Image: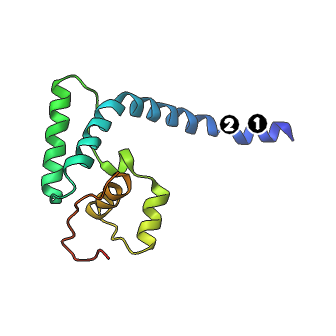
Amino acid sequence: RAEALIESLGGEKGRWSVNAETLTGDYVNLTGDVIVASGLLAYLGAFTPDFRESAAKGWCAVAKEMAIPGSAEFALQTILGEPVKIRSWTICGLPNDAFSIENGIIVDKSRRWPLCIDPQGQAN
């Protein structure tokens, strides 16, 4: 029985190795990602998706110029999103687009009431 258990766990080594590499990269990029995410939370809640994206790209470029490591593609959902919470939001009726999910994250993570726009008029 022990041999069967050990053999069945053999495939987990590869998965854990890939997971460890991913986490190492995430750890290195944490500083820049948190700086950009903080700026987005504090300043960009009231703006359109296009403006948010261009501002975040600009901030990522400035961070790279200053040798602050960060992810190649910034996504607020990846940095601050909690998949279980986001899934519950979509089950409750939140549209499953990036802008709506960003708005949800901004509202969830803000200490005060943030100003968000709702161009579809779906908030209630």
* Amino acid at circle 1: Ile
Q: Quadrant of the N terminus?
A: top right
Q: Secondary structure at mark 1?
A: helix
* Amino acid at circle 2: Gly
- Out of 16 and 101, give the one closest to the viewer: 101
Q: Quadrant of residue 113?
A: bottom left
- Out of 110 and 28, give the one closest to the viewer: 110
Can I make out residue 8 in this image? yes
Q: Quadrant of residue 6?
A: top right
- Asked whether, in this view, residue 20 is left or right of residue 60, the answer is right
Could you tell me residue 80's position as x and y percent? 38, 47
Q: Residue furthest top?
A: 67
- Out of 59 and 17, give the one closest to the viewer: 59
Q: Secondary structure at mark 2?
A: loop
Q: Residue at x 29, y 64 (%)?
A: 100
Q: Residue at x 35, y 56 (%)?
A: 105
Q: Residue at x 36, y 44 (%)?
A: 79
Could you tell me residue 65's position as x and y percent? 15, 25
Reading the image, the residue beneath label 2 is 10
Q: In the drawing, what numbered circle is on residue 6?
A: 1
- Out of 69 and 8, give the one closest to the viewer: 69
- Asked whether, in this view, residue 6 is left or right of residue 13, the answer is right
Could you tell me residue 78's position as x and y percent? 37, 47
Can I make out residue 73 in this image? no
Other residues around mark 1 within 10 Å, as few (<14) / some (14–19) / many (≥20): few
Rendered position, 103 above or below 21: below
Q: Are marks 1 and 2 in contact (CB under 8 Å)?
A: yes
Q: Residue at x 28, y 42 (%)?
A: 38
